[in-house]
Image (tube, grey):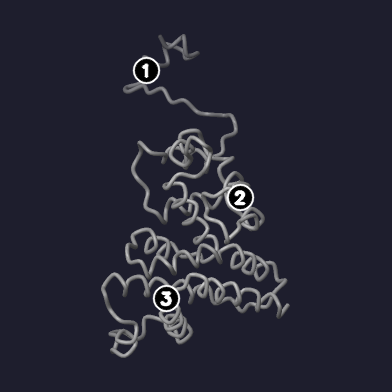
Amino acid sequence: NAESFGVDPELVGKLKQPMLVKVRRSDVDRQALVHELNEPGQQEQSAGERAQGDLRHLDVEKMALFDPESELDASGNRAFTRSFLQNLSHGELNAMIQADGSLSSAGVKRLSRAMVLKAFSSPRLVERIAEQTNPTARILGTAMVNASPVIAKMRAGIEQGALYDLDVTSDMAAAASVFARLKSEKTNVSDYLAQGQIGGRELSGTGEKLLQLYDKHARSAKALTSFLTGYAKYVEGQG
């Protein structure tokens, strides 16, 4: 049936192992295709990998719609969540929303992780938050979600050259990852800082101070959010 494919039968007969290869010539969004192929039913992605893929649906302008005074699945954040959901495939939406159009539990987790990654650029932090069951560490995770729009805006300003580069979000993320790990291990922050560490200190001096601050305000998402957003606004105030 070579002729049905527009191929000369005599030419095919001369080939030892003829193979038909189809080549797509139309334009295709390769990133979208890869993302779609990783929907449920394919190999499960880690929380960090999924968040990395979701960054294409999230930008500083969309994050500005987020209201930290409301839960992600509340009506007060409906405009924000819709801005994120509008570009998802139908298969993804089924797991992300409930019958009334609000975010499902899985949707809340997925969007919050993408927000944290956008602000702090730390897949490791996203993984720590995803696997966290300790209530105190989860409070810090909530604060980082709440502060993420302001942090992301600050970093965008630095990248554009509009603000001085006073970015310590890498230290913030590293300290938060260590804090979550210590809580999982039931290790006190003071004991961790007092002990010697093989190969040098795990955190920078700034990171260790942040770790102590996280521990001091560990039971108050409001206080932690205020600190994180306050730092971003301080940087913006410096011009």
Classify 32 as above or below 77: above
Question: Which residue is tagged 2?
Answer: 80
Of residues 29 and 94, the one nearer the viewer is: 94
- Identified by mark 2, the residue type is Phe
What SS does tag 1 mark? Answer: helix
Residue for point 42% across, 47% down: 106
Of residues 178 and 21, the one nearer the viewer is: 178
What SS does tag 2 mark? Answer: helix
- Identified by mark 1, the residue type is Lys
Classify 29 as above or below 177: above
Mark seen at residue 14: 1
On the image, the x and y values in percent for residue 229 come to: 59, 72
**Label 1 to label 2: alpha-carbon separation:** 61 Å
Q: Earlier in the sequence, mark 1 or mark 3?
A: 1
Residue for point 61% across, 46% down: 83
On the image, the x and y values in percent for residue 217 come to: 45, 78
For the N terminus, give its image quadrant: top left
**Label 2 to label 3: alpha-carbon separation:** 28 Å
Quadrant of the rendered image containing residue 175: bottom left
- Identified by mark 3, the residue type is Ala
Question: Which residue is tagged 3?
Answer: 218
Classify 176 as above or below 10: below
Question: Pointer 1 and pointer 3: residues touching (CB < 8 Å)?
Answer: no
Residue for point 44% across, 65% down: 141
What SS does tag 3 mark? Answer: loop
Circle 3 packing at 10 Å, graded few (<14), some (14-19), many (20+), is some
Task: Say which of marks 2 and 3 sits in front.
Answer: 3
Left/right of residue 155 with respect to residue 205 in the rendered view: right
